[in-house]
Image (cartoon, helix red, strand yellow):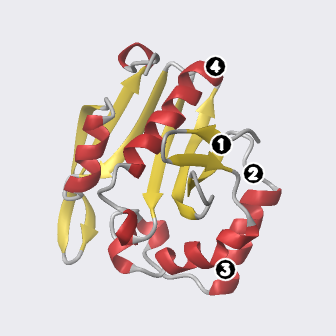
């Protein structure tokens, strides 16, 4: 798989060496609380390793999965995926996580999203990329808006997180809305 390279991050294939960092954030409730039901139960190291090996050895046919890494060291920062890729309707769903809290609020997520959207629209010839985000996850919501995503809808009281219901915001960006030249 080709690397997608930005000014500070590179999107690269996952490696077995990423397992420890992935396991650390998968067991951090602050990191996973906005990631949906699938991530609410902390996995064992064995489960994390098995999940990672599956992505490495048998990636889904309708997805592209990248590790977000520091451009200089190639050290793992997070993950970004396009899933449910539909070549007929030319759309996909984006998901992203910046694993370690010390790497957040530094622009790595926005840069990674820009790289992946460029690949989605120019490389994969997609027309639309969507995502869902909790309305309470203000940091992520701000990042997505900065990257050009538009709010398309809201599911009221969709998730129960930290003892309260939260709305889920549906967002999308069209090929024509993405500044491909940057």
Among the two numbered marks 3 and 1 on one chain, the one whose residue lies closer to the N terminus? 3
Image position of 89 (left or right of 3)? left
Q: Nearer the viewer, mark 2 or mark 4?
A: 2
Task: Report the Cα–Cα distance between label 3 and label 1.
Answer: 21 Å
The residue that label 3 is drawn on is 47
Assess disc 4: are there few (<14), some (14-19) or many (≥20) residues with their C-alpha within 10 Å of its C-alpha: few
Q: Is residue 121 above or below residue 84?
A: above
Of circles 3 and 1, the one toward us is: 1
Whether residue 157 is visible, yes or no, is: no
- Residue that badge 4 annotates: 88
User: Farthest residue in the front direction?
Assistant: 72
Position of residue 80 measured from the top left corner of the image (x, y, whole percent): 53, 50
Q: Are marks 1 and 4 in contact (CB under 8 Å)?
A: no
Query: Relative to the observer, which residue lies in front, 172 or 69?
Result: 69
Give the mark nearer the N terminus: 1 vs 4.
Answer: 1
| Among numbered discs 1 and 2, the one appearing first in the sequence | 2
> Where does label 2 land, which residue?
59
Q: CA distance from mark 1 to mark 2?
A: 8 Å
Residue 64 has which mark?
Answer: 1
Which of pointers 2 and 3 lies earlier in the amino acid sequence?
Answer: 3
Examine the rendering and report whether any part of residue 128 can be seen: yes
Q: Label 3: few (<14), some or many (≥20) within 10 Å?
A: few
Task: Look at the numbered discs 3 and 1 and tell me whether their residues touch, using CB distance below 8 Å.
Answer: no
Q: Position of residue 78 (x, y in %)?
A: 51, 60
Residue 128, position as x, y percentages in the image:
46, 24
Q: In this orientation, which residue lies closer to the viewer: 126 or 16?
A: 16
| Quarter where residue 102 is shown | bottom left
Residue found 42% across the figure and 75% down from its top: 40
The disc, 3 or 4, on the residue closer to the chain's N-terminal end is: 3
């Amino acid at each position: 798989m080709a690397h997608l390279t930005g000014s500070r991050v590179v999107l690269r294939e996952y490696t077995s060496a990423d397992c420890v960092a992935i396991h650390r954030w998968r067991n951090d409730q602050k990191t996973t609380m906005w990631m949906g039901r699938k991530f609410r139960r902390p996995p064992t190291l064995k489960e994390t390793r098995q999940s990672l090996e599956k992505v490495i050895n048998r990636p889904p046919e309708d997805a592209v999965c990248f590790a977000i890494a520091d451009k200089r060291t190639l050290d793992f920062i997070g993950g970004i995926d396009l899933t449910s890729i539909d070549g007929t309707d030319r759309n996909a769903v984006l998901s992203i996580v910046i694993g370690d809290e010390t790497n957040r609020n530094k622009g790595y997520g926005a840069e990674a999203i820009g790289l992946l959207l460029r690949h989605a629209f120019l490389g994969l010839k997609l027309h639309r990329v969507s995502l869902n985000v909790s309305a309470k996850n203000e940091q992520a919501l701000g990042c997505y808006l900065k990257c050009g995503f538009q709010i398309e809808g809201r599911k009221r009281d969709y998730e129960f997180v930290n003892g309260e219901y939260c709305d889920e915001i549906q967002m999308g960006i069209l090929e024509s809305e993405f500044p491909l030249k940057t």
